[in-house]
Image (cartoon, rainbow, N blue to C red):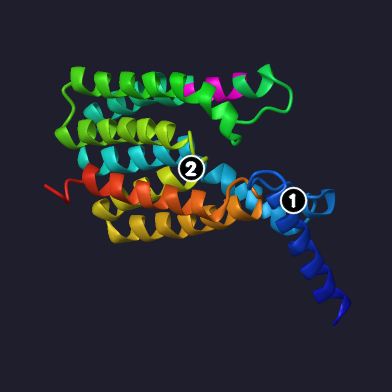
Amino acid sequence: MSPKIGYLKSSFEGRKIRALGSGGETHMTDQEKASPAAHFARLVSRIGHPLVFIMISAGIVVAKQLPARTAVPVLAALFISVILPTAFLLRAGAQSVRGSKVSEREERRRFYPWAIPFSALGAFLMWRMHTPIFVIRGALVMLALFLIAAVVNFWIKISLHTLFASYCTVILFQVGPVWGAGAALLTAFVFWSRLFLTRHTLIEVVAGVTLGIVGGVFAVGWLG
């Protein structure tokens, strides 16, 4: 066995042992964190962050479907009522307890009770602004996804990255095949990054993809 293959094998086995000893959540070594692949995986996770994916996808959808005089207020309402408060919540939560992360299941029990009302507020504002039905339906489905993820969190820490990436991908395919294909490619990289960075187990990222696709199908009205 060559030294390189031996290192890769020992590294993989080390991750597997750490995963078994930490309830399925592994921790990367300093050497793994400093690798080019880890840097790329972190970049992908930032680009594919749910807040980023949702805001960019919403921008594409409303820009393609609505006139500018309607699209701008809709995006502003979404940003102010959902994106900005949730980003602040994530930032404040990360600083409130040293070392705490929303990527940990226990921390999400404190995250969802705040994130869900923000999502509900966004859906309410869409309704009050008399936006087209597809926008309201998308906001309501996003709220439902948060609710389901909060319930599922009692058993597994479902990946919100892959959930909302998949959800947005389905919607963007409805907008156009090029947009959908681009989102699908990014979603595949996000899937890989969450596993590589040991933020989630395979079942958690697969559950996120599955729930996101189902939510996307409902949002675009393909089931009725």
Q: Quadrant of residue 23?
A: top right
Task: Give the number of the disc on residue 213.
Answer: none
**Residue, far right:** 3
Question: Who is closer to the viewer here, 122 or 96?
Answer: 96
Q: Residue at x 60, y 23 (%)?
A: 91
Q: Residue at x 36, y 47 (%)?
A: 211
Residue 91 inside the magenta-drawn segment: yes
The amino acid pointed to by label 1 is Arg
Q: Residue at x 31, y 52 (%)?
A: 170
Main SS of the magenta segment?
Answer: helix
What span is colored magenta in the figure? 86-92
Query: Which one is closest to the eye, mark 2 or mark 1?
Result: 1
- Earlier sequence position, callout 2 versus callout 1: 1
Give SS at disc 2: loop
Count of marks placed on residues: 2
Q: Does 70 sit left or right of 113 as displayed?
A: left
Question: Who is closer to the viewer here, 120 or 1?
Answer: 1
Residue placed under numbered mark 1 in the picture? 18
Give SS at disc 1: helix
Q: Position of residue 207 (x, y in %)?
A: 43, 50
Residue placed under numbered mark 2 in the picture? 158
Question: Who is closer to the viewer here, 26 or 168?
Answer: 26
Q: Residue at x 27, y 24 (%)?
A: 123
The amino acid pointed to by label 2 is Ile
Q: Is residue 199 above or below residue 143?
A: below
Q: Does 82 sit left or right of 12 as displayed?
A: left
Q: Position of residue 70 (x, y in %)?
A: 22, 28
Q: Is residue 161 above or below residue 116?
A: below
Q: Position of residue 20 (x, y in %)?
A: 69, 51
